[in-house]
Every structure is written in C-alpha cells, then in structure tokens.
Amino acid sequence: MSTEPSTDQPNALRVVADAAASLARGTDLDAAIGTLIAGAAGSTGAELAALFVQDPEAGGLQLVAAHGFPDEAIGGFEAEVVGDPDHPISVAARDARPNIGRIGTRPDGTLMTGADLPLIVARDGIDLPLGVLSFGWSGERSVPEEERALLSAAADLIAMALDRVRLATLVHERSEWFERLAHTDALTGLANTRLLDRVLELEVARAGRQGSELSVIVFDVDDFGSFNERAGREAGDDALRRVAAALTGSVRLVDTVARSGADEFVVVASGSAGEIVARRLIDAIAALDEDAGGVTVSAGVARFPADGTAAEALMEGARQALAGARADGSGSLGVVAAEG
C-alpha cells in the first residue's frame, strides 16, 4: 500500500501558503475554505473531505463544506454523522481530540482510512472547539508525518478563520446593541430623548420642504408621584410600560413614540390631526385594565407650522399646552393658545 503522494499532487507548502493568503486577505471565506480543503485533500491523496462546524445556537454539528462526495450522497452522510453521537467524527468533535489513521468501512463494505481533526481555538487559556475537519482515503493506509502536519495546518487555518468570523459577528451584534441602547429607553423600549431630538429635527425639516403639517403631542401621567407612593416603584414601572404599549399600539407605524421624562411621553405624528390623535391616545390609556392601576394621562398638542417652525418651539408649545390641560384635571387635552 502506498503512503507517498504522487508527483502530480499539489505541493503541501504551496497549499498552506495560498490558503493562508486567501483566508487573511480574501473576502469570500467559503471559497477560501473550499480551496484549502480541496488543496489539502489533493496534496495527501484523500478522495473525500468534509467540514463540520458546531452550530453556536442550536448546538450539534452542521456540514458546511464537502469535497469528493456525489451530490446525492452528501445529505445521507451528514445525517449519519449528526445523528450518531458515536460516529468517529462526532466523537472527535465532542472530545476535541484528533483521530488520524482510523480504519473504517464504507456503506458498500470496502475499507477506508479516515482522519478527523477538531477545529480548536484558545481564548483566555481555554480551548474552544468549533468543529471537525475530516478526510478519507480508499483502502487501508498509513498517514505519514508530513501529511499529518499538512492536515493539522489546514484545520488550524480554518479554525482561525471561523473564529475571526464569529468574533466579527459578535462585535457587530454588540455594536448594534449599544447603538440601540444609546437611542432606546431601557424601561419601556421606546425611543429616548436623544433619538426623539433627531427625529423631530428631521421631521420638521421634511415638513418645511414639503409644505406639510406636523403634530407634536406631549403626554404626562396624571399624579404619577402619588401613584408611585401608593402602589410602589415596581407597580409604577409596570404602569409606565403599559402606557408605552398603549401609545405604540394606537399610532401609525410612521409616527414616533418616545419617553422624554420620568412620566412624560412624546408622539411625533405627520399631519394636522394632532388633537384627534391625542384624544384617541388619552382614551386608549384610560381604557387600560385595572392591572394598569387606573392611570390616566393628560396631553398638550403643538402643530407645525402654526405653533412653531423649529423643533424647540414645538416642544415648548406642546409642554405649555400640557400645563394648561393639567390645570383642567386628569385626562385633559390642551392646545397652544391662539395669539391675539
């Protein structure tokens, strides 16, 4: 039995060098990994190769690349490995130990030699298994040291590439999370003051360009301080969340709902029907079930351009209208007083 690669097989050093360059500078990770697997298989004479990766969410192995398999055989092979915890490839993944030179039997009864190399990266001194790179040869053969070194190098390169992708994904997800956190009220999930200011500036500018109208509605939970003292902080937080849900459930998708203070909420709605929208929202909150603690809100409305042509003027006008509404009692609605 032959253990030496034929002269027409690719040079092992060239395989590793080309793969390292592709993985380091390439933009198509799948293609780079596929080329590396095919090169390693060709350099060692392996007829088959497969890359299984641990699914970070669902758990278990997933076949992500295959070389030398007929298309109709890939599904069955993946099911065989994934469905059998005692399959050598599954064992190599679970134990994070290479198994090179194992002798097995193909489904057709012929002998084959396999090599299963776990993909492992170290972080903070702890080995993290990412999957398994497996190769197969027809018949029974030994795997010389130089081939073992090449296969191990291929597994290490793929492990580093996969780890880099996962780290990049984690960084992106954390960046998105921090971005959302920076513009979201932690208690209610609504837009916070920072996002409200940005949206209001943009909406005022848009309304000015288009010659359209815009409504700014400021809501305040009636006598919220007394409610907190009577029912407790936890009940108060729950009431605020219910008010927030009622507001978002009663406006259009194009409208913006924000929490702008301890018990203050703002709705930015395109069009001139601010008073109608405000009254509908006041009624929706008053109709909340008893679990909400029977809270009510009062509101003040300002309109662009009638009550102001700048974001600050509209907010100030809506708050002045709210102050007038609160003087009229709970659940009241106020508008900017006409001049004259």
Image: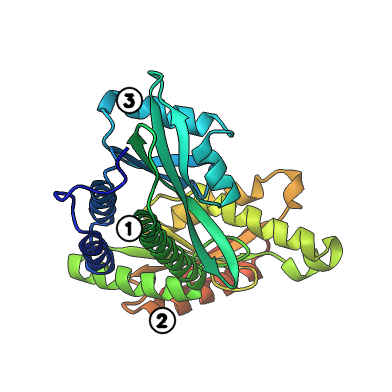
Residue at the image point whose x is 49% and y is 40% from the top: 89
Residue at the image point whose x is 55% and y is 30% from the top: 84
Q: What residue type is labelled 2?
A: Glu
Q: Mark 3 = which residue?
A: 73
User: In terms of secondary structure, where does tag 1 sit?
Assistant: loop
Q: Mark 1 = which residue?
A: 271
Q: Where is residue 287 in the image (x, y as percent from the top left)?
A: 65, 45
Q: Tag on residue 124? A: none
Colour scheme of the rendered structure: rainbow
Q: Position of residue 116 (x, y in %)?
A: 45, 45
Residue at the image point whose x is 27% and y is 54% from the top: 36
Q: Distance between the residues labelled 1 and 3?
A: 61 Å
Which of discs 2 and 3 lies nearer the camera? The answer is: 3
Q: Tag on residue 312? A: 2
Badge 3: residue crowd in 10 Å (few <14, some 14–19, many ≥20): few
The quadrant holding residue 13 is: bottom left
Answer above or below: position of 6 versus 179: above
Q: Where is residue 318 in the image (x, y as percent from the top left)?
A: 48, 72
The residue nearer to you, when weighing 307 against 166, is 166
Visible residue check, residue 339: no
Residue located farthest toward the right when viewing the structure as drawn:
230
Answer above or below: position of 192 versus 165: below
Q: Position of residue 172 (x, y in %)?
A: 41, 66
Mark count: 3
Residue at the image point whose x is 65% and y is 50% from the top: 286
Q: How far apart are marks 2 and 3 (CA)?
A: 67 Å
Q: What residue type is labelled 3?
A: Ala
The disc, 2 or 1, on the residue closer to the chain's N-terminal end is: 1
